[in-house]
Image (tube, rainbow, N blue to C red):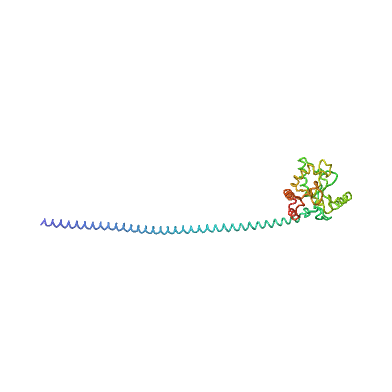
Amino acid sequence: MRFIRKYYFLLLLGILVTLVVSIGVNIYQYQVNKTLEVEKMSLFEERNKFLLDLASSTVALGSATTTIADLEKVVADLEEDKDDLKDNLRDEKNKNDDFEDQIKDIAGTVGVLDKLSKTDKELLQKYSKVYFLNEHYVPESLSEVDDEFKYDESRPFFLHSKVMSFFEDMVEDAKDDGVDLWVVSAYRSFDTQAQLKGDYSVTYGSGANTFSADQGYSEHQLGTTIDFTTTGINGGLAGFENTPAYAWLTKNAHKYGFTLSYPEENGYYIFEPWHWRFVGTDLAKDLNQADSHFYDWEQRKIDEYLISVFD
């Protein structure tokens, strides 16, 4: 009987232990399963989050790629606009330059016309038996020649005031080269020329016409013409062509704006190596370079130099 009770007790104990172990195993399994479920859920969430982040990154990357492409297009458009703007600016600058040139041309033309209007048109006219200078003509301004430049200091000689500086530079440079140039005749009024021609006519008759102009036809009335003498001919004119003074003038006078009016074999008067007329440096130099003389050129060609006669 005791044995049976012991047996049942052990059986009951075994069932109880089995039940407890079973319950413990189930509880453990439940906990394990729950933990796995939680971890699984956590991994799922992590995966979803990763996928979302990846999707966001892809979208962002796509957006960034799109933005870069847009920016590149904008830059390209700006470069094109810049080139167009540069072309437009260049065109406008060219237009402005052309306009400025036109303004300068107009201003220059106005300046030339204004200068010409203030320049005595008689200064480059041919008066030796060609044009007539009336009795009322007097140069705009006359200045007296200094005594040091006169052969006879007791006589007054006058020159056009604007010619004086050219004349003085010439005779001073000649003196530096050892050549004496003295004035024996300069400006003559209409009346003075008439009296002089009358005196010559009395003495030489019609022969006076070969070396003396009638009143109104003399270059001396312009105040720009000088008769020179020099050392060795006693203040006269004869023999002047054989002097160092004439050789110096022939070589240098054009630099100062003077030209020989009546060279050998001219069609107006006898050869007058002493008679030099101021015509401006531009015309004098061009005549010299062309081996020509004042009366060789047409008046229309000579008139082109009027604008620069005193430059």
> Where is residue 12, by image quadrant?
bottom left
> Where is residue 94, by image quadrant?
bottom right
Instruction: Find residue 50 and report its horizontal and vertical position in percent.
Output: 37, 57
Instruction: Indicate left or right for 246 with 91 as reference.
Output: right
Instruction: Find residue 297 and report its horizontal and vertical position in percent.
Output: 75, 53
Name the one closer to the observer, 5 or 20. Answer: 20
Instruction: List the single residue furthest toward the left.
Output: 1
Instruction: Find residue 121 and report its horizontal and vertical position in percent.
Output: 77, 55
Instruction: Find residue 65 and report its horizontal and vertical position in percent.
Output: 44, 58
Instruction: List the single residue furthest toward the right.
Output: 202
Instruction: Indicate left or right for 86 with 160 as reference.
Output: left
Instruction: List the single residue furthest toward the front.
Output: 265
Name the one closer to the observer, 226 or 63. Answer: 226
Instruction: Indicate left or right for 234 with 299 as reference.
Output: right
Q: Quadrant of the N terminus?
A: bottom left
Name the one closer to the observer, 142 or 48. Answer: 142
Question: Would you place residue 245 above or below residue 191 in this image?
Answer: above
Badge count: 0
